[in-house]
Amino acid sequence: MLTCLRLPDATGWLPAKVLSSPNLARRSWLSKSLALAFLLHPFWLAVGGGLYLHAEPSGIADHPASPGQVVAQSFFNVAVVADVQYADKPAVGNRAYAASQSKFQEAVIAFNQQELVFGLDLGDLIDGNREKSATDLQTIMAVGNQLKVPWRHVIGNHCLGEMARSDVLKAHGMTNAYYSFDYEGWRFVVLDGMDVSHWSEPDSFEARLSVEYERKGPPFYLFNGAVGPRQMAWLRDTLQSASRRGLPVIVCCHLPTLAAASNPGLLLWNHPQVLRIIENSKCVRAYFAGHDHPGGYAFQRGIHHVTFPGMVESPANAYAILKVYKNRIEILGAGQIPSRNLTWP
Ligand SMILES: [Zn+2]
């Protein structure tokens, strides 16, 4: 299901100030210089270089070549953010909650320079701010809505910390917190890592299961959660059908599942079981997560585990574009997110 969060009109921010200035000529020169500096940023040179070299619009299928012809490899672009964690409240330590609004806006402006197919929010769009949480969500979604393509949302612990699960899903236009969709020969599987957690559906089987985990104490911390049995069965089926159809899979979940790619205290409660399913499926190529703000990376049994650094704790911002090819993925990172080339032997 596409979750469309666009506003009818995404214009009207930067130019107005410049045009209303009395020093129009000077401001115009300044804005051109800033625009040039922006476009010459290594991130966009890399993105633009990729687009230029391959010279094809994103999302198109491979086509046969005549002998001697250089085949341009097709790809599609996906915008990625993790742990924006916006809140209209003072910073705590390195977590600059309010600053995420301008950082997210900077990311969206940069994303809109590219041809994208969708944006991927890896969870924790808000931090949770008591009775102000719903307003915070509206504020940050108004920024996200300026993206020219729809967002696919992953639900994180902070999304649910101070808001009812049903309200968060409704705000995102989602009917379920876990889902899958196919795009250009790839399957994306979005997991709900908070399925069994302190914020499970009230009075559900998952909520009762969560109480059992919580009673055990560390390392079953309250800010983590598990993929429940019903979601596990769905995951198994979804991966089996991808395998039968020969589709490579990217799994997205707010919580990481491999200790080598994350702080071990921030993994899914049932990470060994989830890991076993995705490794045994033989079709999962990458597992993308957030939650651990410094980020991490590891490659194990054919799967690239990428934990994307969180925007809220990245003074120089943190966002990325994935260039998804048929047999590799380039991560073009900005700010704290390192660029990587994910390939498979
Ligand atoms: Zn989190």
Image (cartoon, rainbow, N blue to C red):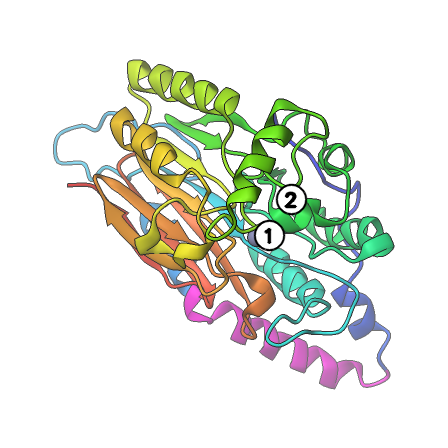
Q: Ligand 1: does it lie within 8 Å of the C-beta at label 2?
A: no
Can you tell which quarter of the image residue 199 is in?
top right
Mark closest to the chain's N terminus, 1 or 2: 1
Who's the residue at 78% across and 36% down the image?
Answer: 167
| Position of 336 relative to 142 (above/below) | below
Who's the residue at 28% across and 19% down the image?
Answer: 246
Report the span colored magenta: 22-43
Who's the residue at 28% across and 53% down the image?
Answer: 298
Residue under circle 1? 112
Q: Position of residue 153 (x, y in %)?
A: 60, 39
Q: Nearer the viewer, residue 314 or 228?
A: 228
| Position of 181 relative to 311 (above/below) | above
Task: Give the amino acid type for the residue marked by disc 2 in the picture.
Answer: Lys
With 27 as the anchor, is 257 left or right in this view? left
With 314 as the anchor, is 76 left or right in this view? left
Residue under circle 2? 148
Q: Which secondary structure lies at badge 1?
A: loop
Q: Position of residue 188 (x, y in %)?
A: 45, 31
With 254 as the anchor, is 103 left or right in this view? right
- Tell me the CA gap for discs 1 and 2: 6 Å
Dot 1, crowdedness within 10 Å: few (<14), some or many (≥20)? some
Q: Which secondary structure lies at badge 2?
A: loop
